[in-house]
Image (tube, rainbow, N blue to C red):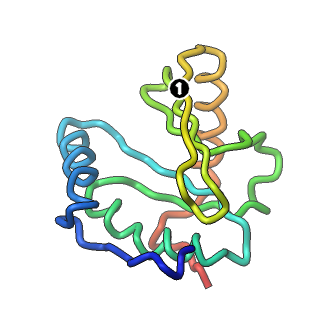
């Protein structure tokens, strides 16, 4: 449950520091780290938690945008979350409704990676930067 989760926004905390270091190092090398979140509205408690904790992602150097699901019409979204690396590798993430990681799968299929790249591009163009997304 999200209510039982402690909101950790300290980039130096034991839980957050490894991620912050990884992303900061990549950004320093010139790597673009972008995250787009497609969300249903009104947002759930879990999305409120994610929104509040995004400050750590931003401090690390990520760019984060939010897209309300109703503004994603016409974009054929995958059925699950994914990470796209260099537009060649896809890491699918499987989560419970409360946000717990259930597992993941990796694909290096060029067709799948190309489709995910196109989806991400479409979502990114429509999404609003974190600072402009009103969660309420």
Q: Hey, which quadrant is residue 32 in on the image?
A: top left
Give the class, few, some or many, for how many residues have Cα within 10 Å of label 1's Cα (few <14, many ≥20).
few
Q: Hey, which quadrant is residue 119 in on the image?
A: top right
**Observer-nearest of 54 and 97:** 97
In this rendering, is residue 69 above or below 92? below
Residue 66 left/right relative to 77: left
In this rendering, is residue 69 above or below 116? below
Give the tally of numbered discs. 1
Q: Residue at x 39, y 78 (%)?
A: 6
Q: Residue at x 59, y 14 (%)?
A: 110
**Observer-nearest of 19 and 119:** 19
Q: Where is residue 51 drawn, in percent x and y?
A: 49, 71
Q: From this viewpoint, which residue is outermost toward the bottom?
A: 136
Q: Which residue is mark 1?
A: 106
Q: Split into 4 quadrants, where in the image is the N terminus?
A: bottom right
Q: Residue at x 48, y 79 (%)?
A: 4
């Amino acid at each position: 449950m999200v209510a039982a989760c402690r909101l950790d926004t300290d980039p130096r905390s034991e839980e957050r520091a490894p991620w912050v270091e990884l992303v900061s190092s990549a950004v320093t090398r010139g790597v673009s780290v972008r995250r787009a979140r497609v969300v249903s509205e009104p947002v759930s408690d879990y999305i409120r938690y994610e929104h509040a904790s995004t400050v750590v992602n931003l401090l690390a150097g990520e760019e984060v945008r939010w897209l309300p699901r109703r503004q994603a019409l016409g974009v054929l979204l995958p059925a699950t979350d994914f990470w796209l690396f260099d537009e060649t590798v896809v890491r699918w993430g499987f989560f419970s409704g409360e946000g717990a990681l259930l597992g993941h799968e990796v694909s290096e299929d060029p067709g799948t990676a190309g489709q995910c790249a196109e989806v991400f591009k479409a979502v990114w163009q429509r999404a609003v930067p974190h600072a402009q997304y009103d969660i309420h």
